[in-house]
Image (cartoon, grey):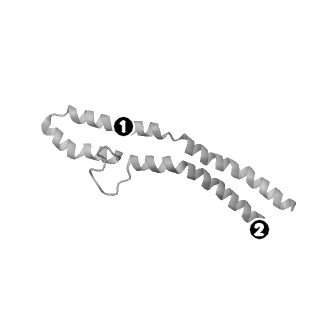
Amino acid sequence: MNEIYTILQNFNNVAKPVAEETVTEAVEFDPQEFEYIMDEIRGLADQALQMLPYEERRAAESNWHAHILGAIGGDHGGDRLGGSMHTMANSLTNVAYSSDEDEDEAWESIERTAQNLLK
């Protein structure tokens, strides 16, 4: 029985920093800051477009401007290009909603491993 206790102690010493690292990575992501950056990029693209003469603006609007907005995605005309592009809005959604899941999965993995060691 002492061997199992020692194994579990050693496992806990190794697993805890790994789980904490997973949680730390998830906590560092700031969805509001990410969304702010998306808005800034969108605003700069619009500003650059407005600087162009009318003749060039039409071509830019249907090419580089549309690609930038498409890469940002979301509710601000970013879906103009269609297709299956992974947008910044997709990343925001995926990361913002997965941080809690990552922490839960890390601890569940530790618990499963501990249970397997006890068998």
Q: Residue drawn 45% across and 36% down? A: 33
Task: State the image coordinates of residue 50 (x, y, percent, origin top left).
Answer: 21, 33
The alpha-carbon separation of the residues under discs 2 and 1 comes to: 53 Å
* Mark 2, secondary structure of its residue: loop
Residue 105 — which label? none
Q: Amino acid at mark 2?
A: Lys
Residue linked to disc 1 = 39
Please tell me which residue lies in front, 89 or 25: 89
x, y percentage for residue 17?
68, 47
**Residue at image mark 2:** 119
Q: Is residue 79 above or below residue 31?
A: below
The residue lying toward the viewer, choosing from 62 and 103, is 103
Helix, strand or loop at mark 1: helix
Q: Going by the picture, which residue comes out furthest to the front?
A: 75
Determine which quarter of the picture holds residue 54. top left
Quarter-of-image position of residue 53: top left
Residue appearing at x 70%, y 61% in the figure: 113
> Residue at position x 50%, y 49% from top?
97
Which sits earlier in the primary sequence, circle 2 or circle 1? 1
Q: Is residue 40 left or right of residue 92?
A: left
Residue 19 place in picture, x, y as percent: 65, 50
Category of crowding for the residue at label 2, using alpha-carbon neighbours closer than 10 angstroms: few (below 14), some (14–19), many (at least 20): few
